[in-house]
Image: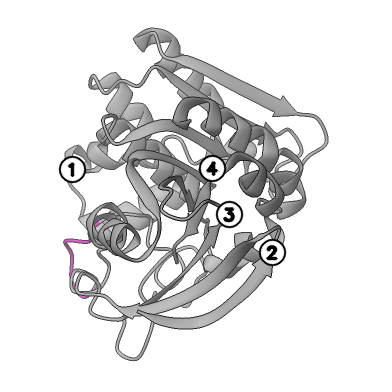
Amino acid sequence: METISENRAFGGVQGVYRHASVQTGTEMTFSAFVPPHADGAKLPVVWYLSGLTCTHANVTEKGEFRAACAELGLIFVAPDTSPRGQGVPDDPEGSWDFGLGAGFYVDATQPPYARNYRMWSYIGEELPAMIASAFPADMDRQSIMGHSMGGHGALTMGLRFPERFRAVSAFAPIVAPGQVPWGEKAFSGYLGDDRATWRAHDAVALIEDGAYIPALLVDQGDADPFLRRELRPELLRAACDGAGIALTLNLREGYDHSYYFIATFMADHLHWHAARLL
């Protein structure tokens, strides 16, 4: 693991790191904030998955999480959203919602993406092993959150691995990718046309098929331009009501899809996670 940068912040260390990934066959970059802590202490880990077009840098620079993480004693890890580098296939049409920066947190099965686009295994297996070995992380106390496409990733990871993640939350998540244009495009390209295979990576479908976690926290801006076409939180509400999952769905008046929205409510989410981690 190569250290790209480390900076003192709120008594802790904000780092950016690079390593060669077996899963993606590329170099991958991630950021990690480690709060101040006693020597030998093991700290809970909050995973943050970013949205379309983002890298680790978006939340690291604009998410305003460090003060709360320092107060609460939380390690905050932000991976990239896709493999990158020479030879990694992109959308041949050059669009921003598929390919580079848009891995959708799945393991692709379709050529030419299957070799490199293995973000599910990278986030679920490879990077946690690195965090466990390189940082003072208590891997028995993990939680996960994300934004937009990353909200989709956080919800599906949390629903698939409830024994691993003690808390799950999201900002403006894509809750039912199998029913909206962003998800249909991504899943067709990465997973193929058999919609039955999509259900393992669709939060609403997973809940309908029996996946269960006790509680979810979701914040959504009512001025979000993607709300009605791509995000559709009402589908998550209906699925959670049917499954007996306690969903806290906050519709925030006047807020959009940006990091101004995320930063406003980030501390609320981190306190919610901490109550379930500490």
Q: Earlier in the sequence, mark 2 or mark 3?
A: 2
Q: Residues within 10 Å of mark 2 (few under 14, many from 20)?
A: some
Residue type of the residue flagged with mark 4:
Glu
Q: Quadrant of the N terminus?
A: bottom left
Q: Earlier in the sequence, mark 2 or mark 1?
A: 2
Q: Which residue is mark 1?
A: 197
Left or right side of 261 for 50: left
- The residue drawn where x is 47% and y is 55% is 39
Residue type of the residue flagged with mark 3:
Pro
Helix, strand or loop at mark 4: helix
Q: Which residue is mark 2?
A: 9
- The residue drawn where x is 59% and y is 66% is 13
Q: Earlier in the sequence, mark 4 or mark 2?
A: 2
Q: Which residue is mark 4?
A: 230
Work out how far the residue at label 3 is from the one at label 4, CA to CA, in angstroms: 35 Å
Name the front one of labels 2 and 1.
2
Q: What is the quadrant of residue 221 in the picture?
A: top right
Label drawn at residue 35: 3
- The residue drawn where x is 50% and y is 71% is 95
Residue nearest the observer in this picture, 240 or 7: 7
Work out how far the residue at label 2 is from the one at label 3, CA to CA, in angstroms: 8 Å
Left or right side of 141 for 114: left
| Residue extending farthest bottom | 86
Indicate the position of residue 19 as horizontal and vertical percent values.
34, 79
Helix, strand or loop at mark 3: loop
Question: What range of the chain is rendered magenta?
Answer: 107-112
Q: Earlier in the sequence, mark 1 or mark 4?
A: 1
